[in-house]
Image: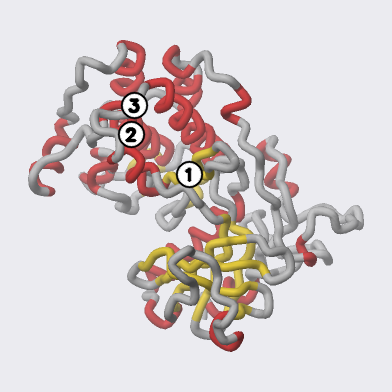
């Protein structure tokens, strides 16, 4: 599909409705990015004018593994609703394409931002960004969601909200505390040694390692483990061999070293990270970005009257002592197999989960 926007990034009203209108709800614009199975486009909601990003996934190119990753991505993104996580607004399913309508990141990603700051960011700036990333990961882990692909490319800026947000849950998964995972995934430079060795691993610990790599990059400007080829980089990671430049403060050095531990059991927990000296003294207002609207369509408006019927996911929310914002969109909810008993459930994703994606 060709771009339908001009050089200024605005949507082209001349674009044919048959090509650019999505279910009568969104007008598609220019291409923001491409992957093996997907294209991400700028889009505008026809009723509200809200700009969004639409990830268009070609289902005909998905094998079993890719389909599984896609389902997990959608499931986890709908579960994790937090001011520092890119919001998935809606899922639209067609016979050949699945459309993920997401919050639009207008400020680029953290990787490009770091590249523009040779030698790393000032620690005050790095601290504000890192604290928000930690908050997002901590919330994910409270919901038993492990990201498994934490890296600067998957952290994006929302300048109007004053926020950085976590995105790309393609390798995410649900985990049970105390039980190990075995799937090898992620990106080499940010992967924990146990994943690269093909061992079973503790889910939260691998995200902690990746957080250590991200913090190192924020204050140093380069990855801690980087050689001329992947084999040498792999050896550096397995040996946990890195050095921290002298300009980095003692507290920051200590926090990095507590996350980049070869032995997962010796890595700092998220509670210890949040309580660390280096992360103290931040203005709480800087860590509370304004949340975007939960839903764009009238059918899912938070202002719709409630019937008193418990929302899907309430049982999980109660168990985790976390609020669950918005109605369920899963055919079998978040009760891990239970059917939805809420007559108000929109079942936006039911077709994708129960028919098209699992056929």
Instruction: Name the residue tied to disc 2.
Output: 209
Q: Earlier in the sequence, mark 2 or mark 1?
A: 1
Asked whether the beta carbons under mark 3 and mark 1 sit within 8 Å of each other, the answer is: no
**In the rendered picture of this protein, how many numbered marks are placed on residues?**
3
- Foreground mark, 2 or 1? 1
Q: Which residue: 34% across, 53% down?
A: 183
Q: Which residue is mark 3?
A: 259
Give the mark nearest the N terminus, 2 or 3: 2
Left or right: 130, with 239 as reference point:
right
Circle 2: element type: helix
Q: Is residue 153 visible?
A: yes
Dividing the picture into quadrants, the one containing residue 344 is bottom right
Where disc 3 sits, the SS reads helix
* Circle on res. 157: 1
Q: Say if 71 sits above or below 251 in the image.
A: below
The one nearer the camera, 316 or 187, is 187
Q: Residues within 10 Å of mark 2 (few under 14, many from 20)?
A: many
**Is the image coloured rainbow, by chain, by secondary structure, or in one colour?**
secondary structure
Q: Quadrant of residue 263?
A: top left
């Amino acid at each position: 599909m060709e771009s339908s926007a001009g050089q200024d990034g605005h949507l082209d009203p001349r674009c044919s409705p048959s090509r650019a209108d999505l279910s009568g709800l969104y007008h598609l614009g220019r291409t923001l990015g491409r992957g093996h199975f997907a294209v991400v486009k700028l889009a505008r909601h026809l009723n509200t004018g809200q700009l969004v990003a639409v990830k268009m996934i070609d289902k005909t190119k998905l094998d079993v593994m890719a389909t599984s990753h896609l389902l997990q991505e959608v499931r986890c993104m709908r579960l994790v609703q937090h001011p520092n996580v890119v919001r998935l607004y809606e899922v639209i399913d067609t016979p050949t394409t699945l459309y993920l309508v997401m919050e639009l990141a207008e400020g680029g990603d953290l990787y490009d931002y770091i590249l523009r700051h040779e030698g790393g960011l000032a620690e005050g700036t790095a601290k504000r960004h890192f604290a928000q990333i930690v908050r997002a990961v901590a919330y994910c882990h409270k919901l038993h969601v492990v990201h498994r692909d934490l890296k600067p490319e998957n952290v994006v800026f929302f300048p109007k909200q004053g926020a950085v947000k976590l995105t790309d849950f393609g390798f995410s998964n649900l985990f049970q505390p105390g039980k190990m995972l075995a799937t090898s995934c992620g990106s080499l430079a940010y992967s924990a040694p146990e994943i690269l060795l093909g061992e079973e691993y503790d889910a939260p610990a691998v995200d902690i390692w990746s957080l250590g790599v991200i913090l190192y990059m924020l204050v140093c400007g380069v990855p801690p483990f980087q050689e001329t080829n992947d084999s040498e980089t792999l050896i550096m990671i397995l040996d946990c061999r890195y050095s921290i430049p002298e300009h980095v403060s003692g507290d920051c050095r200590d926090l990095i070293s507590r996350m980049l531990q070869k032995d997962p059991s010796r890595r700092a927990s998220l509670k210890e990270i949040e309580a660390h000296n280096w992360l103290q003294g931040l203005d709480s207002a800087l860590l509370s970005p304004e949340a975007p609207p939960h839903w764009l369509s009238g059918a899912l408006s938070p202002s719709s009257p409630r019937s008193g019927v418990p929302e899907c996911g309430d049982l999980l929310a109660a168990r985790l002592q976390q609020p669950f914002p918005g109605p369920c969109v899963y055919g079998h909810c978040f009760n891990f197999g239970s059917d939805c008993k809420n007559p108000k459930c929109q079942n936006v994703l039911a077709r994708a989960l129960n028919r098209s994606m699992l056929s």
